[in-house]
Image: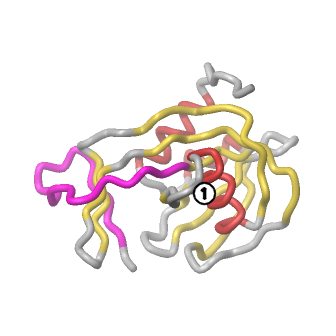
């Protein structure tokens, strides 16, 4: 299914869906960041997706990261809350989703790089490399928020 992102676009379709979601900035011991190239829009992104009934948002981030990258992670903090009503995703099936996502900080505990049916590529990047990657601005904002610090610890 294809997806188109709209941010601050007066021609964007009206949202008809609001789905809780989680993503993760996964950082390894070498300081590299885990990213996936999305199949639906061809952009680099953090692992993440919609929360399922019966799971918490941190559990969602852990599950989505494993499904999309092959890595089991431990949540270590929160990068931020992202709920901009001027940012919507329009899917081929007619859903137009308003963003509502919590982005967590995580570290890998086990696994190996694995491409999923949602991605075409999964890689570790040095933080200096990510500025040149094609990605939607909301993902870039999360990465910049992480790089700028001030992330509260989860205990």
The residue where tag 1 is placed is 47
Q: Residue at x 71, y 63 (%)?
A: 66
Q: Position of residue 78 (x, y in %)?
A: 61, 32
Residue 101 placement: quadrant: top left
Q: Position of residue 129 (x, y in %)?
A: 66, 48
Q: Is residue 78 above or below residue 12?
A: above
In this view, the residue in front, 53 or 17, is 53
Horizontal side, residue 114 vs residue 101: left or right: right
Q: Residue at x 67, y 41 (%)?
A: 128
Horizontal side, residue 19 vs residue 127: left or right: left
- Is residue 139 a member of the stretch shown in magenta? no
Name the residue at the left extreme. 11
Q: Is residue 22 above or below residue 90?
A: above
Q: Is residue 93 above or below residue 12?
A: below
Q: Residue at x 37, y 76 (%)?
A: 2
Q: Residues within 10 Å of mark 1 (few under 14, many from 20)?
A: many
- Is residue 17 a member of the stretch shown in magenta? yes
Q: Which residues are magenta?
A: 3-22
């Amino acid at each position: 299914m294809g997806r188109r992102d709209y941010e601050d676009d007066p021609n964007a379709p009206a949202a008809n869906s609001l789905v809780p979601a989680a993503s993760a900035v996964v950082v390894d011991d070498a300081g590299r960041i885990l990213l996936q190239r999305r199949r639906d829009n061809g952009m680099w992104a953090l692992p993440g997706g919609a929360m399922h009934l019966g799971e918490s948002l941190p559990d969602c981030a852990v599950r989505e990261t494993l499904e999309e990258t092959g890595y089991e992670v431990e949540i270590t903090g929160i990068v931020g809350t992202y709920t901009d009503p001027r940012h919507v995703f329009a899917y081929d099936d007619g859903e137009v989703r308003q963003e509502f996502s919590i982005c967590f900080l995580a570290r890998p505990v086990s696994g190996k790089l694995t491409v999923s049916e949602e991605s075409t590529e999964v890689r570790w990047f040095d933080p200096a490399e990510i500025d040149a990657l094609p990605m939607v601005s909301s993902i870039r904002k999360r990465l910049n928020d992480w790089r700028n610090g001030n992330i509260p610890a989860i205990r």
